[in-house]
Image (cartoon, rainbow, N blue to C red):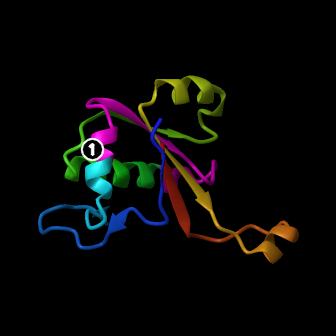
Amino acid sequence: MTLFLTSSPCDNNVPEGLDLPCIFDARNGFVENLRASVEPGAQLLIIASDPDAFAGNDEMAATFEGCFAAAEIELEDVCVLDSRNAGDAAELVAQSGVRVLFYRLANSRRDRQNEQIPGPPHFPVFC
């Protein structure tokens, strides 16, 4: 398994005509390395950092599906793993060729107080 750990794989300089909030950042070789690591026709699994934020999870999946397409990396399917299908987690992970795990960096004081951490940042791990 190849693992990419990145704080931000995206570039906000989206070419004219693409209806995406961002594309993959090609400046550091990320896109080339991703292309070399992803089998054509792989299934992409987005593992949500907030399992109950369905709309945001679906939006993130659509964005990353678009990023892969813009990078000319062919995917067979895109799936979100959150509380809607948590019972199928082992099967979904086993079926996927590309996994993107999102996690949040949290303020430790808030963590100690068990407060909800609002909004981003979400950081992806590709594997």
* Residue to which mark 1 is pinned: 35
Q: Position of residue 91 (x, y in %)?
A: 56, 22
Q: Is residue 116 magenta?
A: no
| Residue lying at the far left of the rendered structure | 17
Q: Please, is residue 32 above or below residue 7 in the view?
A: above
Can residue 36 be seen here?
yes
Q: Can residue 66 be seen from the camera position used here?
A: no
Q: Quadrant of residue 20?
A: bottom left
Extreme residue toward the right, this view: 113
Residue 10 point in image, percent of width and height: 35, 65
Question: In this image, 45 relative to 111: left or right?
Answer: left
Residue 15 in picture, x, y percent from top left: 15, 67
Q: Residue at x 60, y 37 (%)?
A: 84
**Is-magenta flag for residue 35?**
yes
Q: Residue at x 61, y 26 (%)?
A: 90
Q: Nearer the viewer, residue 108 or 120?
A: 108
Work out whether residue 36 or residue 51 is closer to the camera in this orientation and state it: 36
Foreground residue, 29 or 76?
A: 29
Residue at 41% from the left image edge and 48% from the top image edge: 61
- Name which residue lies at 64% across and 34% down: 86
Q: For the residue marked with disc 1, what is the amino acid?
A: Arg
Magenta-colored span: 34-57
